[in-house]
Image (tube, coloured by chain):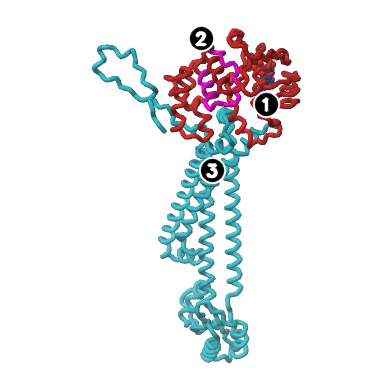
Chain colours: A red, B cyan
Amino acid sequence: MISFENVGLRYGIGREVLSDLSFQVAPNSFQFLTGPSGAGKTSLLRLMLLSLSPTRGLVKVFGKEASTIRPQQMPIIRRKIGVVFQDFRLLDHLTTYENVALPLQVRGKMELDYRQDVRDLLDWVGLGDRMHVHPPVLSGGEKQRAAIARALIDQPDVLLADEPTGNVDPPLARRILRLFIELHRSGTSVVIATHDLSLMDQYDARRLVLNSGRLQIYD
Amino acid sequence: MTNESPPEVNSPKTSAKQKTVKPKRQPKPLRSGQSIVPRETVAGTALVFVIGIMTFLACLTLGAVSMVNTSAAKWQNDISREVTIQIRPFDDLEMEKAIKDASRIALTFNGVSKVTALNNVETARLLEPWLGAGLQLDELPVPKLLTVTLADGAKPDFAKMREQLEIQVPGSTLDDHRTWVDRLTTMALTMVAIGTTVFLLMMAATVTTVIFATRGAMAGNKDVVDVLHFVGADSKFISRQFQKHFLILGLKGAASGTLGAIILFIILGLWSSGSLATPEGDQISALFGTFSLSWSGYFWMIIVLLLVALLTAFTSSFTVQRQVNNLQNYRR
Ligand SMILES: Nc1ncnc2c1ncn2[C@@H]1O[C@H](COP(=O)(O)OP(=O)(O)OP(=O)(O)O)[C@@H](O)[C@H]1O
Ligand SMILES: [Mg+2]
């Protein structure tokens, strides 16, 4: 689904943040991506999302070599990938409901067709009574859940989540993890970047560990 | 747009003593009523102002060109329906006979419908601006003028007419205003060319302004554009979000510019018809025609309005799509 071959990344003329990464994210797989702060987890997710191109090496998504993808095809690929950003990236001028519905709106779907789905999902992540407010008045954890809901709403083939439990209490973190596991069971490949060890201990899954630019894989 | 309330939650605050009073429930809207690209973030006033000025000037150019064209066509038509024969007096010329001969010759040609000699009073009036009033024509060797009126669209053989006149009526010359008509045509064409160039330059300036405004709006909405990317919006969807605003801005600017131009033309029209009775007004209207714009002139101004608005929307859409394709290019 996503495969890296000898990928290296450096920002500008700085040191190499990631070096010589080779791994695959298989269809319908579940993995944690971990490592100390600053190890390059976010950078690696951005490489997978094709929002960053590597300094060297080969990135393939859905069988296509990334550098051969034309700009016009990019939206089609992005629609198969759900992302939860570490900084959420919700649009402050839209309501929570509109933020979560955005991926569907962008795909040209009618509000009448998706309204109930969006409500159900928001209920599920515990934002049922917050869906009409704007993100600036949401708490950190609520924003996080809204960002997760937005990434899940169209059942992506791959879900990339950057610290999806960074702002929530342990019970809610468990609940979010269960949501991801359920998503994985329904066929989505899940990559969760986290440094929360207790979260990883709750579910036995593949671990990709980044350390000083290198990747170790524990299957 | 739907305004739906979230599922009812029974508020625990509704205490027993308030039970009789029905709690006022404002259904909270799910939707913010905001577009994805907020309207306020697209710098409007300056753009509307510039588009307004550009449209105003474009309409003025259009109006001026159309007026010159109408006047030129009118002159051309008037002039080409008349030629003049001039008979210069000299010592032993019998003027009366010469006039008769000349008329007879002219009338033998196809398409000549009438020949009239200007009498002394008319000639005196014609010469008044140069020689002053109260002219005694009998004392002066003033040439006689014969107006030859042509049937509509007729083109008699002027070369032959000139030849015959010169042989049979000494001292006569035929003026078919050819040089005048040619000059008028050239002038009118030049005016149209200049007007068109000015018009195109103004449209180019408008397009450039819109491109810069669009880029500004995109830079100001970088967060929104980024998020739209990540949730899979294509360049068309993103450009539509901006185009909406720019179409409205374009319409506003173009409408105010066109309105300004129309008002100006109406005022000028009223002013010129008010001063038409005076000699100055006579001269102005003789030269420029009246300041009245034909209905087609106003029609074309409305076309300019729509053109500018569409141009604005199209330019912004095109700019956004290009920028988005750049942003989405993996190999930056
Ligand atoms: N846009 C950028 N320009 C330059 N350097 C960057 C940029 N983004 C990240 N870096 C650097 O790359 C390294 C990896 O950053 P990254 O954000 O990928 O780490 P991370 O593992 O996600 O950290 P955290 O757990 O704190 O989120 C850091 O040293 C950071 O300073
Ligand atoms: Mg990070």
Q: Amino acid at mark 1?
A: Leu
* Relative to B9, B96 lies left or right: right
Q: Which is more toward the observer, B90 or B132? A: B90
Residue B296 is a magenta residue: no
Q: Chain of mark 2?
A: A
Res A160 quadrant in image: top right
Q: Which is more toward the observer, B43 or B306? A: B306
Image coordinates of residue B58 in percent, x first then y, are 54, 51
Kindly tell me whether residue B23 is visible in this rendering.
yes
Name, please, the residue furthest toward the left: B20
Q: Amino acid at mark 2?
A: Pro
Q: Which residue is mark 2?
A: A171
Task: Give the residues in magenta.
Answer: A144-173
First along the sequence among labels 2 and 1: 1
Q: Which residue is mark 1?
A: A52
From what the image shows, is residue A144 above or below residue A117?
Answer: above
Image coordinates of residue A71 in percent, x first then y, are 65, 35
The residues tagged by marks 2 and 3 sit, at their Cα atoms, a distance apart of: 51 Å
Q: Amino acid at mark 3?
A: Ala
From what the image shows, is residue B228 above or below residue B186?
Answer: above
Q: Which is more toward the observer, A17 or A154? A: A154
Mark toward the viewer: 2 or 1: 2
* Relative to B173, A59 lies left or right: right
Q: Residue B313: give its label.
A: 3
> In the rendered image, which quarter contains the C terminus of chain B?
top right
Report crowding for label 1: few under 14, some 14 to 19, many 20 or more residues within 10 A (C-alpha): some
